[in-house]
Amino acid sequence: MAFSDKNIINSWLQNAKPWVDAIRNNEIESRILVTNKAITNTILQKKPQTVLDIGCGEGWLARELNKSEVWTYGIDIVPELIREANKQGGGEFQVVSYENLSQKTIKKKFNVVVCNFSLLGNESVTKIFQSVPNLLNNDGYFIVQTIHPAAESDSAYKDEWRKGSWTGFSDNFTNPPPWYFRTLETWKKLFQDNGFVLEEILEPINPKTKKAASIIFIGKIKRSRPKNKRHTLKKYFNRSLKSLMSD
Ligand SMILES: C[S@@+](CC[C@H](N)C(=O)[O-])C[C@H]1O[C@@H](n2cnc3c(N)ncnc32)[C@H](O)[C@@H]1O
């Protein structure tokens, strides 16, 4: 399969059914042992009321957050996954592609935006990082869980497309999606160049393998102080100073 963002979408369109089965039947061990709890706890520590789940799949994370009375809006490109998510409830779900994600299509702002193993491509990921600041409230967080860059130690350590694989998944999966590998430095730069302060990086460990099961980036939106307010305050002090001196 050729390396492109489009082919990632094609693959997920083909694999919706086995993906739903894999999640609902707890077929992915590292999720059950480590990464599901890691992302849920990280989000809940920020005490959000609202969460946008980008690339939400069949909606498990919304259902989990709903238990703590957090309202989640999930978006994904695959209609079958969104249908499954809506069937189960626990949030609101809509078919929206990363390419179409914007303030215009979503029309809401959130306390937390999360991507759980859903930032897989090249241009589409750049686009997400540009769109997310406009979808966050002041003091909002962008939380990303993804494959740890050190986990792929056999290949050269550089940003590049890699071949996908369904190793460890059931035989019902076909046509593995390619994915775009990023170094740690590139991930950090994506946050910093798009208006986030990288507040923390977590490395959840798989207790069985003793290896990093994932990496979690916690970015806080950096809003510059409104210029007008600063200006008004300066004016006010200057005026008060003048009137004091003339008294
Ligand atoms: C590995 S799954 C993760 C799903 C979910 N976040 C979870 O934790 O189970 C990746 C998801 O990203 C979605 N996705 C990939 N590229 C997309 C795009 N360009 N627009 C919208 N969704 C996309 C896929 O449809 C798939 O549901």
Image (cartoon, rainbow, N blue to C red):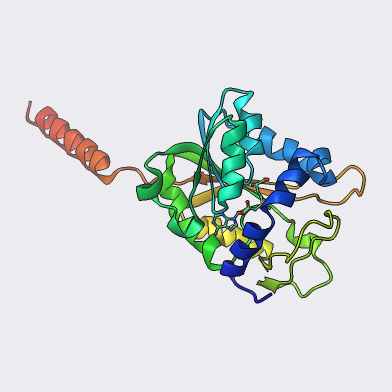
Q: Position of residue 204 (x, y in %)?
A: 78, 44
Q: Is residue 230 left or right of residue 110?
A: left
Of 122 and 236, nearer the camera is 122
From this view, report whether residue 153 is shown above or below residue 76.
below
Of 237 and 136, nearer the camera is 136
Q: Position of residue 126 (x, y in %)?
A: 51, 63
Q: Is residue 143 left or right of residue 26?
A: left
Residue at x 53% of width, y 67% of height = 123
Q: Residue furthest left?
A: 246
Q: Quadrant of the C terminus?
A: top left
Residue at x 67% of width, y 52% of height = 16
From this view, report whether residue 195 is shown above or below residue 9.
above
Exactly how many numbered labels are in the figure? 0
Q: Position of residue 30 (x, y in %)?
A: 82, 45
Of 78 and 143, nearer the camera is 78
Q: Residue furthest right?
A: 208
- Quadrant of residue 108 in the image? top left
Q: Is residue 229 visible?
A: yes
Q: Quadrant of the N terminus?
A: bottom right
Q: Position of residue 147 (x, y in %)?
A: 73, 56
